[in-house]
Image (cartoon, grey):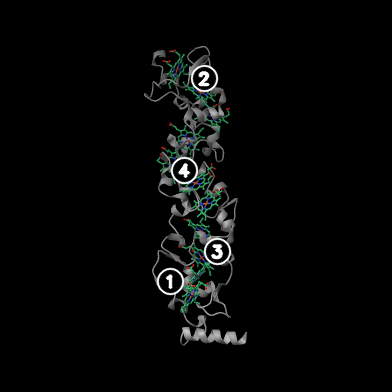
Amino acid sequence: MKSLYFIAVVIIALVFPGTRTYAAEQDPCLACHVEFKKPAVSVHAVLASGCQACHTAVESKRHPEQKNSIALIRKIPGLCYDCHDRSQFKGKSVHPPVIIDTCTACHNPHQSDFKWLLVKNIPGLCFECHTESKFKDKSVHPPVGEGLCMSCHVPHASNFTKMLIHDTPELCYRCHDRKIFTKKHVHVPAAVPNGCNLCHNPHVSGTQNLLLHPVFDLCTSCHSGQKEGMHILGSMHLGYGASIHPVKGVEDPSDPPKQLTCISCHNPHSSDFRNLYVTKNLCKKCHKEFF
Ligand code: HEC
Ligand code: HEC
Ligand code: HEC
Ligand code: HEC
Ligand code: HEC
Ligand code: HEC
Ligand code: HEC
Ligand code: HEC
Ligand code: HEC
Ligand code: HEC
Ligand code: HEC
C-alpha cells in the first residue's frame, strides 16, 4: 500500500510539476480537461470552488492512465442533496427520473449550452422520454406549441397531481380570465379540482377548443338523457306546453352555417342565467317569430 501511495504521489508530481496533491493547485484538473475553460450558457456555480467539491483522486490509482482513478465523493443524488434542499424533490407527485435518482438524465453536472445546466432545451428534453407526437395535433394549446411546459409543470415534484404548478382551475386562471368561469351559476365540472380536464386536453386536440370530444358527444357523455338528440323543454317557456326541441342535425339560425348543438343554448362554463343559458331571453335568440 505504502509503495503504491508513493508511486501515486510521484506521478501526480510529474503531471503537475511543483505540486504534490491536486488540492495544492487552484485547478490542476483543467490542465488536461480544457473543455471546462470554454464559456457556456450556464455554469454550475460550485465549479468555482474546484473539481474537488465533487471528485476525488483514488489514491491507489494513476489518473488518467488507470480506469476509475477519479471517484465522486458521494453517489448521486446524495451528492446533489449535500447542497440542494431535498424538500423540493418530494411531494404528492414526483417525476419518475427523480424517484430513481437520475439527475444527470436532465442536468450536466458541470456546464451546458442551455439554461439550468440542462442537457437539452425544453421541450426537446421532455421529448427524450415523452412521445413528441402526443403534443402535435390539429389544435395546439399556445403555451404547449411554444414549448413552455414549465408554465404549468415543475420538473421535479409538486404537491398537486401530474407535477402541476397548481390544480385546475387555478392553474388555468394564471392565463385565462377567471370571470368567464365564475359567473352566478357555475357548471359543476368547471368548478371542481381538475374539472377543466374532464372536457379539455391541456396540450392538444383533434377537435376545436382543445375538447376531448366533439361538443354533442362530450355533453351527452355525462348527460345521457339528452342522447336522443332531442330535448324536452319545460312548459314555462312562452306558454308553450312541454315540447321536444331539436338539439342537433339542424342549422343554428343565430349563427349559420354552424349546426345547432348544446352550446347554442348552454354556456359550458358558467352563466348569469339559470340552466347556464347563453343569454337572458334564450328563445328570442333564434325564434324572432315568437316575439
Ligand atoms: C494529465 C491530464 C489529466 C489531468 C491532470 C486530469 N485528467 Fe481527468 N482525464 C484525463 C483523460 C485523458 C481522461 C479520459 C480517460 C478516458 O477517456 O478513458 C480523463 C478522465 C476523467 C474522468 C472520467 C473517467 C474516470 O476516470 O472516471 C474524470 C471524472 C476526470 N478525468 C476527472 C479529473 C479530475 C477531477 C481531475 C483533477 C483532480 C483530473 N481529471 C485531472 C486526463 C487528465
Ligand atoms: C457538482 C459536482 C461536480 C463538480 C464540481 C465537478 N464534477 Fe465532474 N462529474 C460530476 C458528476 C455527477 C459526473 C457524472 C458521473 C456519472 O455520470 O457517473 C461527473 C463526470 C465528470 C467527467 C466524466 C465525463 C463527463 O463529462 O461526464 C469528467 C471528465 C469530469 N467530471 C471532470 C470534472 C472536472 C475537470 C471538474 C472541475 C473543473 C469537475 N468534473 C467538477 C460532478 C461534478
Ligand atoms: C458543493 C455544493 C453543490 C453540489 C454538491 C451540487 N450543487 Fe448544484 N449548485 C450549487 C450552487 C452554489 C449553485 C448556485 C446557487 C443556486 O442556484 O442555488 C448550484 C446551482 C445548480 C443548478 C442551477 C444552475 C443554474 O443555471 O441556475 C442546478 C441545475 C444544479 N445546481 C444541479 C446540481 C446537481 C444535479 C447536482 C448533483 C450532481 C448538484 N447541483 C450538486 C452547489 C452545489
Ligand atoms: C426530467 C428532467 C429533470 C430531472 C430528472 C432533474 N431535473 Fe433539475 N431541473 C429540470 C428543469 C427543467 C429545471 C428548470 C426549472 C425551471 O425552469 O424552473 C431544473 C432546475 C433545477 C435546479 C435549479 C432550480 C431550483 O429549483 O433550484 C436544481 C438545483 C436542480 N434542478 C437539481 C436537480 C437534482 C438534484 C436532480 C436529481 C435529484 C434533478 N434536478 C433532476 C429538470 C430536471
Ligand atoms: C429521463 C426521462 C424523462 C425526461 C427527460 C422527462 N420525463 Fe416526464 N416522465 C418520465 C417517466 C418515465 C414518467 C412516468 C411515465 C409517463 O407518465 O410517461 C414521466 C411522467 C411525467 C409526468 C406525469 C407525472 C405523474 O405524476 O403522472 C409529467 C407531467 C412529466 N413527466 C412531465 C415532463 C416534462 C415537462 C419534461 C421536460 C421538462 C419531462 N417530463 C422530461 C420520464 C422523463
Ligand atoms: C397549459 C398547461 C400545460 C402545459 C403548457 C403543459 N401541460 Fe402537461 N399537463 C397539464 C395538465 C393539466 C395535465 C394533467 C392532465 C390530466 O390529469 O388529465 C398534464 C399532464 C401531462 C403529462 C402526463 C400525461 C398523462 O396523460 O397523464 C405529461 C407527460 C405532460 N403533461 C407533459 C407535458 C410536456 C412535455 C409539456 C410541454 C411540451 C406540457 N406537458 C405542457 C397541463 C399542461
Ligand atoms: C401559460 C398560459 C396559459 C395557461 C396556464 C393556460 N392557457 Fe389556455 N390558452 C393560453 C393562450 C395564450 C391561448 C390562446 C389565446 C386565448 O384563446 O386566450 C389559450 C387558449 C386556450 C383554449 C382555446 C384553444 C383554441 O383551440 O382556441 C382553451 C380551450 C384553453 N386555453 C384551455 C386551458 C385550460 C383548460 C387551462 C388549464 C389546464 C389553460 N388553458 C391554461 C394560455 C394558457
Ligand atoms: C363541460 C365541459 C367543459 C368544462 C368542464 C370546461 N370547458 Fe372550457 N370549453 C368547453 C366547450 C364546449 C368550449 C367551446 C365553447 C364555444 O365554442 O363557444 C370551451 C371553450 C373554452 C375556452 C376557449 C373559448 C372561450 O370561452 O374563451 C377556454 C379558454 C376554456 N374553455 C377554458 C376552460 C377552463 C379554464 C376550464 C376549467 C375552469 C374549462 N374550460 C372547463 C367545455 C368545457
Ligand atoms: C364530466 C361530466 C359532465 C360533462 C362532460 C357535462 N356536464 Fe353538464 N353537468 C354535470 C353535472 C355534475 C351537473 C350538475 C348536476 C346536475 O344538475 O345534474 C351538470 C349540470 C348541467 C346543467 C344544469 C345546470 C344548472 O344550473 O342547473 C346544464 C344545462 C348542463 N350541465 C349542460 C352541459 C353541457 C351543455 C355540456 C357540454 C358542453 C355538459 N353539461 C357537459 C356534469 C357534466
Ligand atoms: C335550443 C336550446 C337548447 C339546446 C340546443 C340544448 N338545451 Fe339543454 N336546456 C334548454 C332549456 C330551455 C332547458 C330548460 C328546460 C326546463 O327547464 O324544462 C334545458 C335544460 C338542460 C339541462 C338541465 C335540466 C335537465 O334536463 O336535467 C341539461 C343538463 C341540459 N339542458 C343539457 C343539454 C345538453 C347536453 C344539450 C345537447 C345535447 C342541450 N342541453 C341542448 C335548452 C337547450
Ligand atoms: C340556438 C337557436 C335556438 C334557440 C335558442 C331555441 N330554438 Fe327552438 N328551434 C331552433 C331550431 C333550429 C328549430 C328547428 C327549426 C326547423 O326544424 O326548421 C327550432 C324549433 C323549435 C320549435 C318547433 C317549432 C317549429 O317551427 O317547428 C319550437 C316549439 C321551439 N323551437 C321552441 C323553442 C323555445 C321555447 C325556445 C326557448 C326555450 C327555443 N326554441 C330556443 C333553434 C333554437
First of labels 3, 4 by sequence position: 3
Mark 3–mark 2 distance (CA, rounded to whole Å): 60 Å
Residue at x 59%, y 85% (from the top left corner): 4
Mark 2–mark 4 distance (CA, rounded to whole Å): 33 Å
The amino acid sitting under disc 2 is: His
Q: Secondary structure at mark 2?
A: strand
Q: Residue furthest right?
A: 1
Residue at x 43%, y 43% (from the top left corner): 136
The CB of the residue at mark 3 lies under 8 Å from ligand 4: yes
First of labels 3, 2 by sequence position: 3
The CB of the residue at mark 1 lies under 8 Å from ligand 2: yes
Q: Nearer the viewer, residue 94 or 36?
A: 36
The CB of the residue at mark 2 lies under 8 Å from ligand 10: yes
Mark 1–mark 4 distance (CA, rounded to whole Å): 38 Å
Q: Nearer the viewer, mark 1 or mark 3?
A: 1
Label ID, residue 161? none
Q: Nearer the viewer, mark 3 or mark 4?
A: 4
Residue 269 point in image, percent of width and height: 49, 33
The CB of the residue at mark 4 lies under 8 Å from ligand 6: yes
Q: Nearer the viewer, mark 2 or mark 1?
A: 1
**Do callouts 1 and 4 mark residues in contact (Cβ within 8 Å)?**
no
What residue does disc 3 label? 84
Q: Residues within 10 Å of mark 2 (few under 14, many from 20)?
A: some
Residue at x 53%, y 61% (from the top left corner): 103
First of labels 1, 3 by sequence position: 1
Q: Residue 235, relative to residue 7: is it above or below?
A: above
Label ID, residue 203? 4
Label ID, residue 231? 2
Q: Secondary structure at mark 4?
A: loop
First of labels 2, 4 by sequence position: 4
**Do callouts 3 and 2 mark residues in contact (Cβ within 8 Å)?**
no
Residue 142 point in image, percent of width and height: 41, 44
